Image (cartoon, rainbow, N blue to C red):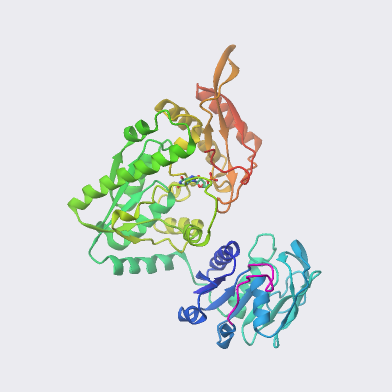
Amino acid sequence: PVLVVDFGAQYAQLIARRVREARVYSEIVPHSMPVAEMLAKDPAAIILSGGPSSVYEEGAPGLDAALFDNEVPVFGICYGFQAMAQALGGTVAHTGAREYGRTVLSAQGGTLLRDLPADLPVWMSHGDSVAVAPQGFAVTASTPGAPVAAFEDLTARRAGVQFHPEVAHTEQGQEMLRRFLYDIAGIEPTWTSSNIIDEQVAAIRAKVGDKQVLCGLSGGVDSAVAAALVHKAVGDQLTCVFVDHGLLRAGEAEQVEKDYVAATGIRLKVVDAADTFLGHLAGVTDPEQKRKIIGREFIRTFEAAARELDAERHIEFLVQGTLYPDVVESGGGTGTANIKSHHNVGGLPDDLQFALIEPLRTLFKDEVRALGAELGLPEEMVQRHPFPGPGLAIRIIGAVDRERLDILRAADLIAREELTAAGLDRDVWQFPVVLLADVRSVGVQGDGRTYGHPVVLRPVSSEDAMTADWSRLPYDVIARISTRITNEVREINRVVLDVTSKPPGTIEWE
Ligand code: XMP
């Protein structure tokens, strides 16, 4: 693999993703990992990520110069660039001057920047800068704030840049990464989702042997793909459980029960728990309270189903659709504020006493989608927008009951249909429709007064749901959705559009 050494989580993830977009397998390792351990992974190259703005900053993580005692190609980015320069005997000027945001790079040839426009917009975020490149390195670019903005040593197969090639604001950034990987490090771009399938299938077979495996399906992409992968590996030894909590959107339960089973042949146990969930949710309006009840009931229901199954066939393994961002978030962040008690309906308590299988642990969402398609899952399932575990319960502002769920389902279905008809599914990350169940407003329809509820359209664009912006959907699409909802859903007489980014808003309303 290409190892991305993490000096500051937000950059490393993005770099790893860009490397894979260049069809080279990559993994992130913490900067605290000893060099010997990194080398033991037999890396094709090592990329040092950005991090603090200066190697002089207090508590700035160190870089073990032993990394350069061997022949592994190395690419330093931003902080990694400075740390590399320093470790190899260059000088980092402790200027204290800062350069943030967009700046223009003057490129002067070299392999990394070969034939790129001479003045190139790049994204910077640094305090100090490299003043003198280490011996053997050619300086190939500068910016107003950084005399040495890029360097390379083709013999040693090492290069570095002061700016961030991984961010979208750096035009040609992906091209530069590719040149490092292909032209400087000499790596072949051969990594594809079928490689992952083969590797994972072999690994799962080796781990599971002839034992029985259980998987909880949430209706979402991740658990569906994880289960399909495990099924490919161990076939009939896998049983899936799908808890229908009655908070799903129109057609979702059926999609899991019919399309998914048809596509995969997986043995599926469906538990209809709508009465239990709605019973416990009756009269509850507080968002956190709703989330806690749903989380608890989900676990109870799943455990009961697992016990029943375990009596029939002894289960030793549990499949989880954990993705890479989940791993990073739970390992990386300390002291982060609890904004919402996210409950991943695929997520289960540890005291279930099963060993875990997490075949998607190293992947990002779009990679999981590619894998799902490769495994033959239906397109509508693979391209589904994320949907929260607590379902429509957190899209009804007010208490949840069957009638309100039906109203919201009808409105939500119209919004989804129109988005799909307009060919915009891929342009939006997610499109919650929210029912303001405790709000009424006056309207007029067919010469009569109405006193109905508003729904909120909340289409957002995002890369990872951590930040988001409201989607600028074409007005005619919004107009069609509005007209259809108010015409077809009797209880709704007003449609409003949420134009808040995240932050300050969150994607969901509760
Ligand atoms: P927020 O509302 O926090 O949501 O901006 C970020 C993303 O997470 C989804 N979400 C959840 N997913 N269990 C889940 O599995 C939850 O409890 C949950 N709450 C929010 C939300 O739909 C968005 O994609």
Observer-nearest residue: 97 or 68?
Answer: 97
Please tell me whether residue 220 belongs to the stretch shown in magenta.
Answer: no
Along the line of sight, which residue is nearer the eye, 360 or 86?
86
Measured as percent of width and height from the top left, residue 130 is found at 74, 77
The overriding secondary structure of the stretch rendered in magenta is loop
Q: Which residues are magenta?
A: 51-64
**Is 426 placed left or right of 298 in the picture?**
right
Q: Is residue 392 visible?
A: no
Residue 72 at x, y = what percent? 55, 83
* 286 is higher (above) or lower (below) than 26: above
Which residue occupies 55% across, 17% down?
Answer: 451
Instruction: Estimate the x, y position of residue 223 in percent, counting from the top left.
Output: 39, 52
Residue reaching furthest to the left: 312
**Farthest residue toward the front?**
58
Q: Which is nearer the eye, 240 or 172?
A: 240
Q: Is residue 144 in view from this perspective? A: yes
Image mark count:
0
Question: In the displayed image of the protein, which residue is found farthest to the right?
Answer: 144
Answer above or below: position of 381 versus 477: below
Question: To which quarter of the image does residue 252 belong?
Answer: top left
Query: Where residue 267 appears, x then y in whole percent?
Result: 27, 50
Give the residue at x 42% y 41%.
292
* Image side of residue 423 versus residue 472, left or right: left
Q: Quadrant of residue 446?
A: top right
The magenta stretch spans residue 61: yes
